[in-house]
Image (spheres, grey):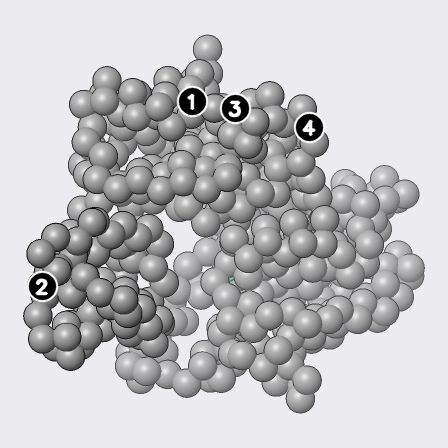
């Protein structure tokens, strides 16, 4: 007997047929004598619909009311999934996040899990009941309903795996696993049998939207291995787990493309201590997350600063910089929207050299110009033109020997 967490995303429970399909899949594993906890998302599109309705009524809805509204999506699917199992003769019970013991801090729409009390849930399991938990939600200390950020059902699943000490955590989704690159852009991408938490985290935060980045951070912190697999094809997926030394044999595990960035160039600002601090303080006060930063060497007392921000925040970013420029009495902001960030990721970079030069040669062979470069221990990123980016990622994927034969 094993204790298994199974998480199904929005497309996997998108309509009645799919919910019945999910119920059959659960029953199969339950019939083998396993204890099963199911975590479900809202049907795909439902959360976005609810957000749009809220915004149509109030341009700036209160976070508390947003949480109250959005949890409705998951509440629908837990009840329907429990009913579908009951229709197959399986004893099943649905629980909200709060009932499942997910306790969070009080920050609405982006709450963090502070503790788990899974005693009630485990009692249900010990009574041979399948437990269906609403993903994405928890409760604060006063019982207030909170949500865990977009895509937060993944986090619910990983946290529950830790909370009930599960033997296996399976994230069922509409892709077959984690690939060396997005197969929609790189047809020769390969499915990876395994990947380390850290690599997955880089890929998750780099526009390869297989999973919510926060949930991967959590799994890394608490060492909760999990599998990403398809809910439509019964095949092994990708195991995400602690790094083992053999993983370093592969230098580049995957290539990611983030087309959701914009470049902000600030020209002619005073080349003296404190300028960058003022610019970035203003950006952080405007809640803009800055990614890559490059400053050139100052000349004649002035310098240029370039950085990237999420594309949705471009307007806020330029306003924040304009404010500082007014105080400084000079300088100019230019925005460039059509960029993409291409990154190669792999724990093998810690022990292998020459990855950067190989990447730059591949891009130069493909005649793609590099605008910005940044590196970390297991990742190298470059900013390039968006309209060359699909071509660029295919070239890089191939250059690092990742293409499927
Ligand atoms: N329904 C929520 C969302 O769309 C949570 C999730 O699907 O994981 O963000
Ligand atoms: Mg999701």
- CA gap between label 4 and label 2 equals 49 Å
Report crowding for label 3: few under 14, some 14 to 19, many 20 or more residues within 10 A (C-alpha): few
Residue 245: which numbered mark, if any?
Answer: 4
Question: SS at mark 4?
Answer: helix
- CA gap between label 3 and label 4 equals 13 Å
- CA gap between label 1 and label 4 equals 20 Å
* Residue 363 position in % (x across, y down): 27, 25
Q: CB at mark 3 closer than 8 A to ligand 2?
A: no
Report crowding for label 2: few under 14, some 14 to 19, many 20 or more residues within 10 A (C-alpha): some
Residue at image mark 1? 354
Residue at image mark 3? 352
Q: Compare marks 4 and 2 and give the one earlier in the sequence.
A: 4
Residue 134: which numbered mark, if any?
Answer: none
Q: Compare marks 2 and 1 and give the one earlier in the sequence.
A: 2
* Residue 278 position in % (x across, y down): 28, 72
Picture layout, residue 363 above or below residue 170:
above
Q: Residue furthest front?
A: 300
Q: Residue furthest top?
A: 405
Marks 3/4 in contact by CB < 8 Å: the verdict is: no
- Observer able to see residue 289: yes
The answer to which of 132 and 353 lies nearer the viewer is 353
226 lies left or right of 289:
right
Q: Compare marks 2 and 3 and give the one earlier in the sequence.
A: 2
Question: SS at mark 3?
Answer: loop
28 lies left or right of 266:
right
- Observer able to see residue 8: no
Query: Which of the image's four quarters has the N terminus?
Result: top right
């Amino acid at each position: 007997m094993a204790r298994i967490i199974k998480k199904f995303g929005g497309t996997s429970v998108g309509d009645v047929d799919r919910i019945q399909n999910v119920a059959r899949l659960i029953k199969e594993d339950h019939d083998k004598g396993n204890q099963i906890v199911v975590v479900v998302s809202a049907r795909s599109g439902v959360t976005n619909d609810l957000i749009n309705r809220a915004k149509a009524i109030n341009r700036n809805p209160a976070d508390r009311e947003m949480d109250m509204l959005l949890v409705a999506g998951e509440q629908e699917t837990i009840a329907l999934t429990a009913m579908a199992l009951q229709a197959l003769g399986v004893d099943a019970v649905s629980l909200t996040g709060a009932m499942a013991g997910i306790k969070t801090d009080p920050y609405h729409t982006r709450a963090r899990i502070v503790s788990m009390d899974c005693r009630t849930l485990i009692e249900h399991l010990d009574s041979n009941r399948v437990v269906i938990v609403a993903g994405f939600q928890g409760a604060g200390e006063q019982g207030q309903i909170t949500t865990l950020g977009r895509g937060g059902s993944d986090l619910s699943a990983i946290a529950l795996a830790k909370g009930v000490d599960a033997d296996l955590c399976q994230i069922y989704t509409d892709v077959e696993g984690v690939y060396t690159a997005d197969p929609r852009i790189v047809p020769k991408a390969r499915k990876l049998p395994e990947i380390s938490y850290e690599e997955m985290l880089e890929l998750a935060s780099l526009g390869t939207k297989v999973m919510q980045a926060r949930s991967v951070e959590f799994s890394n912190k608490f060492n909760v291995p999990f599998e990403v697999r398809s809910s439509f094809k019964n095949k092994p997926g990708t195991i995400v787990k602690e790094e083992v030394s053999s993983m370093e044999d592969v230098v580049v595990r995957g290539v990611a493309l983030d087309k959701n960035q914009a470049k902000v160039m600030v020209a002619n600002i005073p080349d003296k201590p404190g300028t960058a601090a003022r610019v970035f303080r203003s950006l952080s006060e405007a809640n803009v997350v800055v990614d890559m930063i490059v400053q050139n060497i100052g000349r004649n007392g002035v310098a240029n600063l370039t950085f990237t921000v999420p594309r949705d925040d471009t307007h806020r970013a330029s306003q924040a910089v304009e404010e500082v420029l007014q105080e400084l009495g000079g300088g100019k902001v230019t925005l460039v929207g059509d960029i993409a960030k291409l990154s190669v990721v792999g724990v093998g970079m810690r022990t292998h050299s020459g990855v950067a030069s190989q990447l730059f040669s591949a891009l130069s062979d493909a005649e793609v110009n590099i605008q910005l470069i940044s590196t970390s221990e297991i990742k190298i990123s470059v900013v390039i033109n968006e309209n060359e980016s699909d071509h660029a990622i295919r070239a890089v994927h191939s250059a690092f020997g990742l293409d499927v034969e």
